[in-house]
Image (cartoon, coloured by chain):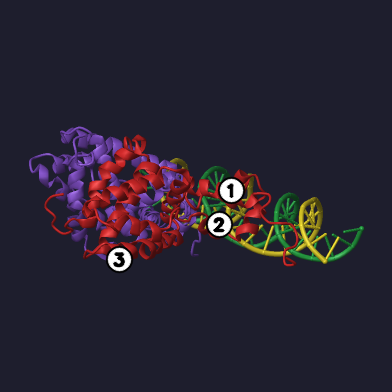
Chain colours: A red, B purple, C yellow, D green
Amino acid sequence: MAARSGRRPGDSGTRDAIRAAAIEQFSERGYDRPSMRSIAQQAGVDPALVKHYFGSKHALFVDVVELPFDPALVIPALFGGGGRDQIGARLASFLVSVLEQPPGRQRIIGLVRAAASEPEAARMVRELLTREIFARVVEELRVDDAALRANLVASQVVGLVMARYVVGLEPLASMPAEDIAAAVAPNLQHYLTGPLGAGTDT
Amino acid sequence: MAARSGRRPGDSGTRDAIRAAAIEQFSERGYDRPSMRSIAQQAGVDPALVKHYFGSKHALFVDVVELPFDPALVIPALFGGGGRDQIGARLASFLVSVLEQPPGRQRIIGLVRAAASEPEAARMVRELLTREIFARVVEELRVDDAALRANLVASQVVGLVMARYVVGLEPLASMPAEDIAAAVAPNLQHYLTGPLGAGTDT
DNA sequence: CCTGTATTTCCTCAGATGAAGAATTCATTA
DNA sequence: TAATGAATTCTTCATCTGAGGAAATACAGG
């Protein structure tokens, strides 16, 4: 207990306030546009505290944009077990559940937005998908071209995020999430278990 | 005396040099990161000329990022006529032909990247899709929910651009374009003419 | 030859940005 | 109570940004 001395950290909530403001700004305006000053201002905090707690803008971004779920747990649950012809639907409704709630939605939108202009963020997304997601999908899905199938699923998911949340296409942007999940599920299913080459019918 | 300032002899070509540099930088780094100075430098031109010819950074972006094809001509050709069950394949291979050549690819990637952080670019994409594309698709496709179907197709196309060109997912990024077209075509077909619900009646 | 206009360069401005350091406040602990 | 170290603030720096203006130059038409 002798090691514990001085003012206890975190009793003011400053760090969390900065993180909350950063999540919001990164998810709404990408990586470049939010400044450390604008984030600090929204958090009601001195700009120097951002650097004090996180060191740099990039470190703050990395700290704040983490997946709101653990792929190591989620993917086996989604892909394992039976019901191979229901994977598309299960995956779609899981994605919807993540994207419709603030914590998950903001982080994922922030990642996607940032990846469009920050090469480092693009690398994060690429490695995260490759290491955390694709590898496990390959493991669970007993199909050839599992990596490509996971790529295609990822492309549809990213496209949906762009279309619904970033670009705001109507009617997609205003639809109930469940309807979107229902519309997308068959195609996710096709990417995962259908024929890839000259597939004749869905 | 060699003049250090003033008009250079011969044909200028300056305007085109600026446009070429701008296309390249917007497509590789989005809207915010390229500066008028960096574009001018790449064009081998004084920064003031960028403002002189285009007025502002935003005007330069708008001038440079135009669709490399005319939807008014392309869409009726794709959707009109018979072969309703081949629309997905025709659309996929048209998209591939546009995306695999420098002029079209750079403009579309530039638009997508910019839309992620520039609200004005997002608005451009939204209105362009709504006015130039969706409206004509609705006209040609005699189906209910034509706008939503076009939204879903757009989401897949944008997602493909992000996954292949921006994030660089493997193996998607290194595959021959025709293979990708073949893999995506059935899903585009499904979005356009298949059932939209969960496979049951909508 | 001379004037006008388009092209080009240089210079300036006002503001924002990420980063860094010094100084101040204050709860906890010895 | 005094010392400690974390939490916080203020100030500074060097740089970049988009924008605008003034002047220099060269070509074209009269």
Q: Residue at x 24, y 58 (%)?
A: B100
Which amino acid type is marked by label 2?
Answer: Leu
Q: Which residue is mark 2?
A: A60
Please state the horizontal and vertical placement of residue D16, each as a whole percent of the image: 54, 57
Is residue B143 left or right of D8 when viewed as pictured?
left
Of all chains, the one bearing label 2 is A
Of all chains, the one bearing label 3 is A
Give whichever of discs 3 and 1 has the lower sequence position.
1
Dot 1: element: helix
Whether residue B65 is visible, yes or no, is: no
Asked if labels 3 and 1 share a chain, the reply is yes
Q: Which residue is mark 3?
A: A139
Of all chains, the one bearing label 1 is A
Q: Which residue is mark 1?
A: A39
- Give yes or no for contact between labels 2 and 3 (Cβ–Cβ under 8 Å): no
Circle nearer the viewer, 2 or 3? 3
Q: CA distance from mark 3 to mark 1?
A: 41 Å
Please state the horizontal and vertical placement of residue D11, each as a whole percent of the image: 75, 54
Give whichever of discs 2 and 3 has the lower sequence position.
2
Dot 3: element: helix
* Residue found farthest to the left: B82
Q: Residue at x 23, y 55 (%)?
A: A84
Q: Residue at x 11, y 52 (%)?
A: A200
Q: Nearer the viewer, residue A169 or A151?
A: A151
Is residue B163 left or right of B8 when viewed as pictured?
left
Give whichever of discs 2 and 1 has the lower sequence position.
1
Please state the horizontal and vertical placement of residue D14, each as a whole percent of the image: 64, 62
Please state the horizontal and vertical placement of residue A81, each as a whole percent of the image: 28, 57
